[in-house]
Image (spheres, helix red, strand yellow):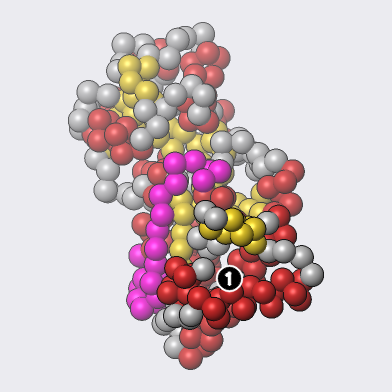
């Protein structure tokens, strides 16, 4: 209680009286008082959980007022996976910054989709950009709104100056002796490559497995490896990577990129403008379907909607 009072700029007695008044109003105990300190009761935990959402809405309301007073104010908190950070996100940030240079933008890397969704529920971020490994389960579908930004697919990329990159046509059999750097087979990208080689009656020549997009890109540019990458990495950053997609007529779909928000949370004006910039970039840089058999677009997962 004393530490809470110091944090709030109140006396210990005032904190105790406030808690007592809440307990009297609710007609239930909110805290268990022990010699070791205080702990939330189940009633207190329920009030805290709902109170967090209420204060989050209040905080968002204050930021809305700030934005209305100054359209260049506000903040946006974005969580994203590495493939998004290395692909579409820089283009979205650049467009957003050119329009709203005074809005504070915070980008948080997430190791997995569940981590990003947890940050949404805890109100630590406003929006999540991700390529989900699997469709939304029912509970996620009921709590989260997912909008498809663009469809993606897996490609094999080699250094721009390598002999493979200069060829007009390549078959998977031509890569039998190639050092391939790929995500693990239990990931969407790795599974797509494994399945493509399996359909061709071949074993994938994977030399290195890593989930890191940066490691795959850097080693691919060295010329000694063929990198397995989402094609969006190359299309959204043309000229940045010294890599070229190999001309393979092989379908290797990947789950589409989603922008995910909470269903029961009103987005602030600055967040809405960030989402709009993401839509514009995705529309302008939409990945064209590959030729031949790979022309089938990736399917939209359950729980995702197109606008």
Q: Is residue 199 left or right of residue 89?
A: right
Please give the range of residues in magenta.
94-115
Q: Position of residue 53 (x, y in %)?
A: 63, 67
Direction from residue 232 to residue 16 in the image, left or right: right
- On the image, the x and y values in percent for residue 92 come to 42, 61
Can residue 292 be seen in the rendering of this structure? no
Asked if residue 7 is positioned above or below residue 92 in the image, the reply reads: below
Q: Is residue 165 left or right of residue 301?
A: left
Which residue is tagged 1? 56
Res 20 → quadrant: bottom right
Front-most of 139 and 241? 139
Residue 185 seen in the figure: yes
Given residues 99 and 21, the one toward you in this image is 21
Q: Assign a secondary structure to mark 1.
A: helix
Structural crowding at the residue carrying mark 1, measured as other residues with C-alpha within 10 Å and reported as few (<14), some (14–19) or many (≥20): some
Along the line of sight, which residue is nearer the eye, 117 or 55?
55
| Depicted 289 relative to depicted 69: above or below | above
User: Is residue 110 magenta-colored?
Assistant: yes
Q: Quadrant of residue 230?
A: top left
Which residue does the image show at 54% across and 19% down from the upper left? 195
* Residue 111 forms part of the magenta stretch: yes
């Amino acid at each position: 209680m004393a530490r809470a009072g110091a944090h709030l700029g109140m006396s210990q007695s005032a904190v105790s009286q406030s808690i007592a008044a809440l307990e009297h109003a609710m007609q239930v105990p909110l805290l268990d008082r022990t010699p070791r300190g205080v702990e939330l009761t189940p009633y207190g935990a329920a009030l805290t959980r709902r109170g967090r959402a209420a204060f989050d809405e209040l905080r968002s309301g204050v930021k809305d007022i700030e934005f209305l007073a100054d359209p260049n104010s506000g903040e946006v908190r974005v969580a994203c996976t590495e493939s998004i950070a290395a692909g579409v996100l820089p283009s979205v940030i650049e467009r957003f910054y050119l329009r709203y240079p005074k809005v504070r933008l915070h980008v948080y890397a997430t190791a997995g989709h569940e981590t990003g969704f947890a940050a949404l529920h805890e109100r630590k971020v406003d929006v999540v950009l991700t390529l989900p490994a699997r469709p939304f389960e029912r509970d996620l579908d009921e709590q989260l709104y997912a909008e498809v930004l663009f469809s993606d697919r897996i490609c094999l990329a080699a250094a721009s100056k390598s002999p493979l990159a200069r060829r007009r046509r390549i078959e998977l059999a031509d890569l039998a002796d190639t050092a391939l750097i790929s995500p693990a087979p239990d990931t969407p990208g790795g599974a797509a490559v494994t399945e493509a080689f399996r359909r061709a009656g071949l074993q994938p020549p994977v030399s290195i497995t890593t989930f890191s997009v940066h490691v795959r890109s850097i080693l691919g540019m060295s010329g000694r490896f063929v990198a397995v990458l989402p094609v969006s990495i190359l299309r959204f950053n043309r000229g940045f990577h010294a890599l070229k997609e190999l001309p393979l007529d092989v379908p290797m779909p990947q789950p589409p990129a989603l922008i995910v928000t909470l269903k029961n949370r009103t987005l602030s004006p600055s967040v809405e403008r960030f989402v709009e910039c993401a839509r514009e970039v995705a529309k302008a840089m939409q990945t064209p379907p590959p030729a031949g058999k790979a022309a089938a677009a990736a399917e939209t997962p359950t729980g995702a909607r197109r606008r």
